[in-house]
Image: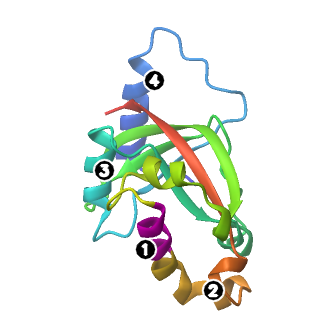
Amino acid sequence: MKLTESELVFWNKYLGSKSTVNPPLNYTVEASPAGSLNITNKLIELYLAGKKSAGSGLVEDFEVAGDPLPKIGNYWIVLDSDKQPKLILKTIRVEVHKFTEVPEYVATAEGEGDLSLEYWKKSHAKFYEPNLASWNLKHIDDSNVITEFFETVWK
């Protein structure tokens, strides 16, 4: 994905803030909102407050879209609801779990709702279920959840 001019300026400010920057040789930088545009600003607030340090998607979504799976060392320029850069996250850990086996610490790291696994499963199932057929899935329990754990490197 090619960065817009404002995203590139934001990225270069981050790079310029470091006396030495040694990103991995094969890192990627992408820019996108933190979620759907109606909740992205709330999610950004959670990242900025240090309450959110992870995000999850479905492996099947990446595969059907032909997108590479997240990997350690990637950077994400998080855009607000006006599509303006607000912070940069770096992927520090990636885990894959069956939907039914997602551990409680994933829900806590995502920082949403009451931080419980029950809340996490209910809200994520509601979000994913309308798209299951397009991902060749019959039930949410058949899905594979990929979770990226982040550190905020620039805000």
Looking at the image, is mark 3 or mark 4 earlier in the sequence? Answer: 4
**Which element is circle 2 on?**
helix
Quick one: 108 or 39, which is closer to the camera? 108
Query: Within the magenta stretch, is there residue 141?
Result: no
> On the picture, is 110 further left or further right than 132?
left
Q: Which residue is mark 1?
A: 123
Tell how many labels.
Answer: 4
> On the picture, is 95 further left or further right than 80?
right
Q: Which residue is mark 2?
A: 132
Q: Which mark is residue 52?
A: none
Looking at the image, is mark 4 or mark 1 earlier in the sequence? Answer: 4
Q: Amino acid at mark 1?
A: Ser
Quick one: 79 or 9, which is closer to the camera? 79
> Mark 3 or mark 1: which is in front?
1
The image position of residue 130, as x and y in percent, is 53, 89
Q: Residue at x 53, y 54 (%)?
A: 104
> On the picture, is 4 further left or further right than 86?
right
Q: CA distance from mark 3 to mark 4?
A: 21 Å
Q: Which residue is mark 4?
A: 15
Residue stretch in magenta: 117-124
Q: Residue at x 68, y 27 (%)?
A: 24
The image position of residue 36, as x and y in percent, is 37, 70
**Which element is circle 4 on?**
helix
Q: How busy is the neighbourhood of tag 1: few (under 14 within 10 Å), some, or many (20 plus)? A: few
Looking at the image, is mark 4 or mark 2 earlier in the sequence? Answer: 4
The correct choice, above or below, for 41 with respect to 121 in the image is above
Q: Residue at x 43, y 74 (%)?
A: 123
Q: Amino acid at mark 4?
A: Leu
Looking at the image, is mark 2 or mark 1 earlier in the sequence? Answer: 1
Residue 61 figure quarter: bottom right
